[in-house]
Image (cartoon, helix red, strand yellow):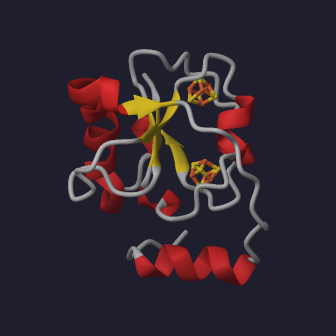
């Protein structure tokens, strides 16, 4: 099992998750194929120790255990795993804190991706 960062992270990237991960398995993409790897962070499923510490740190509620990933985000599980195909293009990012989203921001982001919860 692993945890998965879904597209609810896209363009947020405040990286609260990165700071708490005990095994540094949350990565940013540094390559130029952004149609394959959009602007979000990714969890390496082979390094994740399934501790769940990152999940409550994500203000956008973007992180799920793989078995709990909502069906509208099913492709994101594969996309996190796909980083293994090009791991040299990924690195643990420098943490850059951003203002936290409001409850309205969080709901609007979910609605943008067709998710309600
Ligand atoms: S805290 Fe959440 S939204 Fe921010 S970078 Fe991590 S997964 Fe993405
Ligand atoms: S579940 Fe734990 S090991 Fe896996 S990405 Fe989150 S903090 Fe890191």
Quadrant of the drawing holding the N terminus: top left
Q: Is residue 61 left or right of residue 102?
A: left
Q: In this view, does 73 lie to the left or right of 17?
A: left
- Specify the quadrant of the image occupied by residue 2: top left
Taking depth in this image into account, of 91 and 2 the one nearest to the observer is 91
Position of residue 54 relative to residue 33, above or below, is above
- Specify the quadrant of the image occupied by residue 19: top right
Position of residue 117 relative to residue 112, above or below, is above
Taking depth in this image into account, of 84 and 51 the one nearest to the observer is 84
In percent of the image, x 74 and y 77: which residue is there?
103
Give the image location of residue 110, x and y in percent: 51, 73
**Looking at the image, can residue 54 be seen?**
no
Taking depth in this image into account, of 16 and 88 the one nearest to the observer is 88
In percent of the image, x 42 and y 26: which residue is there?
44
- Ligand 2, by image quadrant, is top right
Give the image location of residue 117, x and y in percent: 55, 68
In percent of the image, x 44 and y 71: which residue is there?
115
Mark count:
0
Give the image location of residue 37, x and y in percent: 29, 50
Give the image location of residue 42, x and y in percent: 44, 40
Position of residue 75 relative to residue 101, above or below, is above
């Amino acid at each position: 099992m692993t945890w998965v960062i879904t597209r609810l992270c896209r363009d947020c990237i405040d990286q609260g998750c990165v700071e708490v991960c005990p095994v540094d398995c949350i990565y940013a993409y540094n390559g130029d194929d952004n149609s394959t790897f959009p602007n979000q962070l990714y969890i390496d499923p082979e390094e994740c120790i399934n501790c769940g510490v990152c999940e409550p740190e994500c203000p956008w509620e973007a992180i799920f255990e793989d078995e709990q990933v909502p069906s509208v985000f099913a492709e994101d599980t594969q996309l996190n795993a796909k980083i293994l195909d090009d791991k040299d293009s990924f690195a643990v990012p420098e943490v850059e804190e951003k203002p936290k989203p409001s409850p309205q921001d969080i709901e609007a982001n979910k609605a943008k991706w067709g998710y309600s919860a």
